[in-house]
Image (cartoon, rainbow, N blue to C red):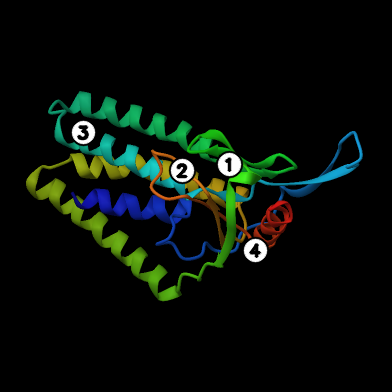
Amino acid sequence: MPVKTFVFDQIQKLMGWCPACRKMTLQTEQPCNFINTAQISGKTGNIPEFRTSNIIFPANTTLVFVLFYICISLLLRYPEDISLFLAGLFLLNIFYYFLYLKTLEAAVLVDRFGVHLHAFRLKKFEIPYEEIESVTSYRLEKRSKKMSLFLVIGGIALCGFFVYIAVAEGEWKPLLLLVSIIPLLLFMGRKQKMRFWDLNTQLYIKTRHKKLYEWTPYYSLITDEASAAELKSFIERHL
């Protein structure tokens, strides 16, 4: 249904969907990018570590979209009783509220053992240096003002269409779904402005052996240019 496309576009813009995404707008100061020097006993002395939480994992976004599509499809198709539908909407919003909070725990730590991905597909994951084949980074392009204006106009037009469908044909489900999800989208947008800044670079970590359940041997992340350069430098130093 058209409501799915509109909601997906809004969540994509908020969560940094890649590779279709462009660049997110410049945000506030980076609060959590830092280099830590850990004391290691032995001849090696102090081994530097690098950690950043100014980061988005596209794999998390993909997981959220898959779950969202399944839930919305079931919700729009099966509950005929309006009470059951409203209860389903409430549970769906609660579920995605906590799911989004979980994605905000995303972080990357590079130390002498390897690359540690926190909340990657909502769980902790480690890539040893011996498994890493190469690291590459790409600058993301800015979303043009014309494209942003087009998205706003398209969103307003779709909202008007859903109102017309609800009034003229009595099909209230898409409109109720859209209305219920707007507070969640506003919450996500506010969190994005407070949590992230200048996400303009995508980093790809290629591993030597692809897991059976993986589509590709690449692990990608989106961060700011300075953090991407530090991560790439730290990883290549151990390869």
Residue 142 lies left or right of residue 110; in this view the side is left
Q: Which mark is residue 106?
A: 1
Element at label 1: loop
Foreground: 194 or 34? 34
Where on the picture, by quarter, is residue 109? top right
Mark 3 or 1: in front is: 1
Q: Which residue is mark 3?
A: 74
Q: Amino acid at mark 3?
A: Leu
Of pointers 3 and 1, the one earlier in the residue sequence: 3
Query: Residue at image x 41%, y 35%?
Result: 96
Q: Residues at badges 1 and 2 in contact (C-beta under 8 Å)?
A: yes
Of pointers 4 and 2, the one earlier in the residue sequence: 2
Q: Which mark is residue 60?
A: 2
Element at label 2: helix
Of pointers 2 and 3, the one earlier in the residue sequence: 2
Of pointers 4 and 1, the one earlier in the residue sequence: 1
